[in-house]
Every structure is written in structure tokens, then in C-alpha cells.
Amino acid sequence: MRKKIQAVASTVAIILILGACSAGSPDAVYQNYLERLGRTLATPVPDLAPTVLPHRPRTGDLKLMITPGKLDALDFLAISGCAVQVTIGKRNSSLGRMAKPSQRLLLELEYLALAPECITYQRQQGRAEIADALQEAWQMKKQQLPKLIFNATLGSPEYRGFWRARALDSSYPANSSSGVITSLEAVNVLAGRWLSGDYSADNLEFELHLSEIAAGDGGILLSSLGRQNDWLDAGNRLLVQRLDRGPLCSGALRPDAAEILPNVVSRYFIGEIQPLSAALGQRYNQLLPPLEQLEVRLNGVLPASYLDWQRQRNALLETFYSAPRRHVEKLQADLAPCA
């Protein structure tokens, strides 16, 4: 008998634990609403139809090729009397040639900033051939700058990390950081400054911004908005199934559901889901603008695979963002005969 009681107690404990986990899951608030909606309208809750999210192309598939110029073969020892001599030595070294895209960009920015003074100096010393080589390299690096910036930002492992899918969390987006927003905005500003001809850069600052972006929540936001869309889409399909049996109210006929439904919507959709929708919408409007502005700056060099993924991503985000509004419109249409 004692063993039986212990077994029952264990079973109850497991149920309570599972119930607590379910209540704390990111789906709980949606599931609770749809179940109440289904009971009120005597209509089964449809199965979810999960949206397939597009995967950002691999970093290696996005990397833009940078054509080497004469600078790669230039003997940096011949460039005496110039600060850019050290820069050329670093970029032509084995470590420089193997540098990751962000470090390669910073080396080229350093060259673009320092080379003009050296070109003038070499001409003053009568070294026209060296000056011409430096000038040609400077023009090439200026033309390649958008590609270099793309490789170091939108096409980088750090920005891939930003879009990486992670496990959904019921406390998101309340637990999200403002640091990634600051870094996205800062990189966008830096890119604009570099493209306008100001080549100054703080190496450590730039790398810290990229590190912050890599830990960002772009992928979580996309998944969270997609999950909300999937649940509300199921709610819309539930309302369609109910409407297939006829309008909720007809003439003087006003069933109990017509009285209960507004309360369910008020308490569980407006009271619980809409605050979450508003928080997700706010996060969307914080994260996306600086990233999209950087994409506009670099639009001329974005590879086809990135553009394809960008179009899919933006189309889904637009659909996801409007999901709460579409559900409200469906509810209003179904309740209209009861007004």
C-alpha cells in the first residue's frame, strides 16, 4: 500500500513539474488562449503549421574575392621615411595574408589613411615609380572598400552568429541586451564614415562591436515572431472552421459563446498576448533598422545568395510582424454579426 502511495505521489510530482514547464514555455500563453478560444466556439484547435525559416548562407559562400594588387609584391623596405611602411609590412606578412576579414579591413583602412602622405613624400624624393605603385594601390583599395566592409560585417561569422537560431525562451525579449543595438548602430555609422573618406578606426572598439553582434538575438527574434505567427495563424484557421458552420450570431439568436468570446479575447489575447507582441515589435524596430541601413550602404556589392536570403527574410518578417493585426481583423469580422 505504501509503495502504491509513493508511486501515486511520484506521478503527481511529475505531472506538476511538467505542468510548470509547460506554463513557462514560450508557447504556453498562445496555447492557453487557443484552447480557451476553441472551447468557447466548440471548435477543435488546428495543428500548428510551422513556418520554415530561411538559413543565412554560410560565411564561406558569401565571402567576396578581393583582387590583389601591386602592393602585395611591393618591397616595403623600399618605402623608407613613411609610417605606412609598417602597415604594408604587416599586411604582406604571412599573418597579414591569413588575417580574418575584420583585421584585413582594418589594415586596408590604415593603408588608405597613411598612404597619401607617403605618396607625396616619395614624389618629393624623386621616387616616381614607388609613388605611382602606392597611388595605384590606394585607388584600388578605395574601390574595394565596400567589399572589404561586407566581408568584415554582413558576410562575417559574427553577423552569421547574430542570425543563428537558438532555443526560444519565455522571458524573451525582456531578457535581451541593449548592447547589440548599440553595436549594430555603431558599425553602421563606422561604415558610412569609411565610405565617405574618413578612414580612421579603433581596432579594439571595432572588434568589440563585432563580438557583441555575434551574441545578438536576430535569430531569436525571427524565431519568436515566427512562432507567434504560427499560433495566431492556427487561431485564424479555428475561426474559419467555426464560421463554416454559420455566423456566430444570426438575427435574434445570440448564443452564450457571443458573451464569452469577448471576455476570452480581452483577458487572454489582449491581456497576455498583445503585451508580448508589443515587446517583440519594439525589439524588431530596434534591431532591424541599423542592420538594414548597412545593407543599403553595401547594396552594390551584396552577393546574389545574400540578396536571395534577404528577400526571404524580409518577406517573412513583414508577415510575422502583421500577424497580431490580422488576427484582430479576423476576430472583429467574426464578432460583427453579434454587435
Image: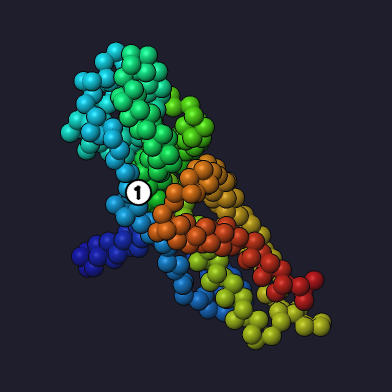
Q: Residue 89: image x %, image y %? A: 23, 25
Query: Which quadrant of the figure contains the C terminus?
Result: bottom right
In screen coordinates, is 55 left or right of 234? left
Residue 289 rendering spot, x and y as whole percentages? 55, 44
Determine whether, in the image, residue 130 is placed left or right of residue 290: left
x 38%, y 56%: residue: 56
Q: Nearer the viewer, residue 115 or 1?
A: 115
Percent x, y of residue 273: 57, 56
Position above or below: 117 against 215? above
Q: How is the image coloured?
A: rainbow
Height in image: 155 above or below 318?
above
Query: Mark 1 Cα within 10 Å, few/some/many (few <14, many 20+)?
Result: some
Residue at which label 1 appears: 64
The single residue placed furthest to the right in the displayed view is 252
Between 130 and 144, which is closer to the camera in this rendering?
130
Quick check: 169 above or below 183?
A: below
SS assignment at label 1: loop
In the shown orientation, is residue 332 left or right of residue 19? right
Query: Which image quadrant: the N terminus?
Result: bottom left
Across and down, in percent, residue 116 comes to 41, 22
The amino acid at mark 1 is Leu
**Residue at (35, 52) in percent of width and height:** 62
